[in-house]
Amino acid sequence: MKNFEISVLDLAPVKQGKSIHDTFQDSLSLANHAEHLHYKRFWLAEHHNMESIASSATTVLIGFIANGTKTIRVGSGGIMLPNHSSLIIAEQFGTLESLFPGRIDLGLGRAPGTDGLTAQALGRNPAIINQQFPRQILELQTYFSKNNSDALVRAIPGEGLDIPLYILGSSTDSAWLAAELGLPYAFAGHFAPEQMEMAFKIYREHFQPSEQLDKPYVMACVNGVAAEASEEAHKISTTLFQAFINIIRNDRKPFAPPVDDMDDLWSPMEKSMVLQKLKYTLIGNQTEIKEQLKDFQEKFNVDELIINSHIYDHQKRLRSYDIFRQAVNSLSKA
């Protein structure tokens, strides 16, 4: 089993009884904690029209987090590129990279990050997304290139800056694209685990070296909930379970505190659907987390694991990331 990096995905979760200002302060606190624990990167994800997630203005929030930290890489996991002009994203991330040199990542996805009606409000055209997304990635690479200096349309700032691109996926479609372009590939196993194994197989087998990357770089995002005691970990994980019930019911309200018994809240069908979506969720004490990480890595052999942790109590959330760091350190020494 090879060693792997660990990182953080933060959706800027809004909790019941808390303000969005509180959410952003908690995100910064988590970023500082992750930096102290030597996590590799801290990513924020673009979502819209959801009371439970406050990272809609993703680029602005990345700037806030980067300004409040010193060394950890900060970026998007991801920017939903067809929601935007390629030039605007190039300029925004060029600005971030100019402000925080060597610390900015640009992870890119094609999904809307929202419901269909809101996607229309964002100006997306679903009929051309599969052609638009690859074209926009090439446009970004052009805008960031030094060779674009003689073009009529330039990204200032952005031009000539080394801003690494990452392709995000929740199905096999983007695996083919990441392989063709020779870019790192991150799979959304935290909500769409069904095709992760096949997506990684496609990516590895069809990878073409590029200027950015000479061999495949595989990243997996999973949900993780750790605590001192196994019973506590399973109890606080009920916030995550409730969040997925709300998605099934199309009720995107703020995240709820944990409960003693999920069977009081979900039907057997909902339970089955939630557990399927959370197939690779890691829950337990440090010993259990270590074993689950080992099993996961033996199956997927990733270069980097990105942990998304929906825990209602902020201090327990920080402690969860501490336990994951210790478990990974223990594995690397084994």
Image (spheres, grey):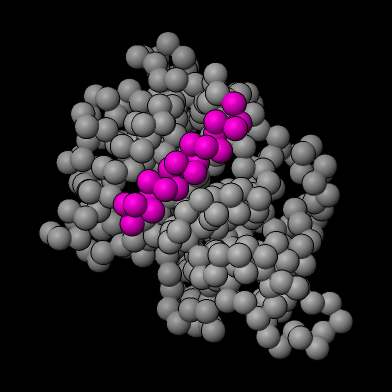
* Residue 27 percent across, percent down from the top left: 50, 41
Q: Which residue, as the protein is rendered here, is positioned at the far right?
A: 152
Q: Name the residue located 39 percent from the left edge and 60 percent from the top edge.
A: 40
Q: Name the residue located 33 percent from the left edge and 57 percent from the top edge.
A: 38
Q: Is residue 64 above or below residue 315?
A: below
* Residue 175 percent across, percent down from the top left: 53, 64
230 or 177: nearer the eye?
Answer: 230
Q: Quadrant of the C terminus?
A: bottom left
**Main secondary structure of the magenta stretch:** helix
* Residue 164 percent across, percent down from the top left: 55, 71
Identify the image quadrant of residue 172. bottom right
Residue range corresponding to the magenta coloring: 19-38
257 or 173: nearer the eye?
Answer: 257
Identify the image quadrant of residue 104. bottom right
Tell me if I can see residue 82 in this picture: yes
Identify the image quadrant of residue 41. bottom left
Tell me if I can see residue 173 in this picture: no
Q: Count the numbered circles shown.
A: 0
Q: Is residue 159 above or below residue 283?
A: below
Q: Along the horizontal axis of the image, is 315 left or right of 130?
A: left
Q: Along the horizontal axis of the image, is 132 left or right of 192?
A: right
Q: Is residue 242 above or below residue 213?
A: above
35 in magenta: yes
27 in magenta: yes
Q: Name the residue located 31 percent from the left edge and 52 percent from the top edge.
A: 37
Q: Quadrant of the N terminus?
A: bottom left
Q: Name the residue located 67 percent from the left edge and 68 percent from the top edge.
A: 94
Q: Along the horizontal axis of the image, is 203 left or right of 39?
A: right
* Residue 133 percent across, percent down from the top left: 70, 63
